Image: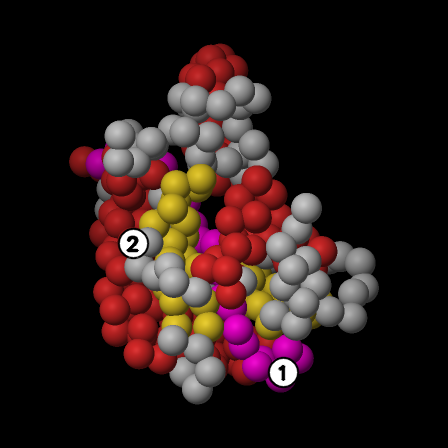
Amino acid sequence: MTIDLTGRRIIVTGSASGIGAGAVEYFLASGAKVAALDIQDQKGDANPNLVRLACDVSDRARVTKAFDSAAEFLGGLDVLCHPGGLNGRGIAEELTAEDMRSMFEVNVMGTYHTNQEAWRLMREQGGSIINFSSMAAIRGLRNEAHYAASKGAVAAWTRAVALDWGKYNIRVNAIAPVAFTAMAEVALAYIPEAQREAALKQMNSMQALPGGLRGGVAIAPLLAFLASDASDYITGQTFSVDGGVMLLGS
């Protein structure tokens, strides 16, 4: 069963793979009109309710251009779903200033750029912004200090702008997902090949629910809920969707 999003106008970043691709598929199946943005080349079946646009979220000029093109196609903007981001591994004491800078340019500044452009298009009628934090920002992950720090900043930004933009009836929430996506593959690739199978089993065993890590599409139902009017009393929150890895509040 899908949530009815008929008529909803949605921008999705990071749409070429993983959670972004799953979100685009789910939103379209729910009746929404979608602009799919990614820095990578995107291919897909022709759909009158879908446009695919190139966008580097770390470049403000390109973000502004992509959002303007998206809004023209959509006829406005109701929802920004922003999973687009960068992951990476590195030993904390060996991280360079460039390692930190590149991570923050995509994850933090990309959130800043896309959120401000969404505000510009939503400020008259309201809307929903869905950012992406990470379990790394909540509990930390070994060899991902720069990634964890960037996602912690995203969570803090989300809470703050939820307060600032509530007067415009713009809701701002975040997701902290655990799913088997390209980012999970990056983490596995950092592990010596002989140890990867054991590492994957360990990742699966962290969850309270059976079945192991699910794909990015498992996050989509919550994204649809946050994109809908059913969530119109929810803002400033970070939701863990992870099969029970975090168990926040326990």
Q: Secondary structure at mark 2?
A: helix
**Image position, residue 89 (x, y; %):** 36, 37
Relative to 90, is 187 on the left or the right?
right
Answer with the quarter of the image where residue 234 lies.
bottom left
Could you say which is closer to the camera, residue 65 or residue 193? 65
Overall secondary structure of the magenta stretch?
Answer: loop
Compared with 198, 63 (above or below) is below
Number of dots carrying numbers: 2
Q: Residue at x 57, y 48 (%)?
A: 220
**Image position, residue 237 (x, y; %):** 33, 54
| Label located before the other in sequence (2 or 1) | 1
How busy is the neighbourhood of tag 1: few (under 14 within 10 Å), some, or many (20 plus)?
few
Residue highlighted by disc 1: 75
**Image position, residue 56 (x, y; %):** 49, 66
Question: Residue pushed farthest left?
Answer: 93
> Amino acid type of disc 2?
Ala
Question: Residue pushed farthest bottom?
Answer: 124
Could you say which is closer to the camera, residue 111 or residue 223? 223
Compared with 217, 236 (above or below) is below
Q: Is residue 198 visible?
A: yes
Compared with 188, 164 (above or below) is below
- In this picture, which residue range is highlighted in magenta? 71-92
Could you say which is closer to the camera, residue 107 or residue 125? 125
Q: Residue at x 41, y 49 (%)?
A: 175
Q: Residue at x 46, y 73 (%)?
A: 127
Question: Residue pushed farthest right?
Answer: 46
Q: Secondary structure at mark 1?
A: loop
Relative to 214, is 234 on the left or the right?
left
Residue highlighted by disc 2: 155
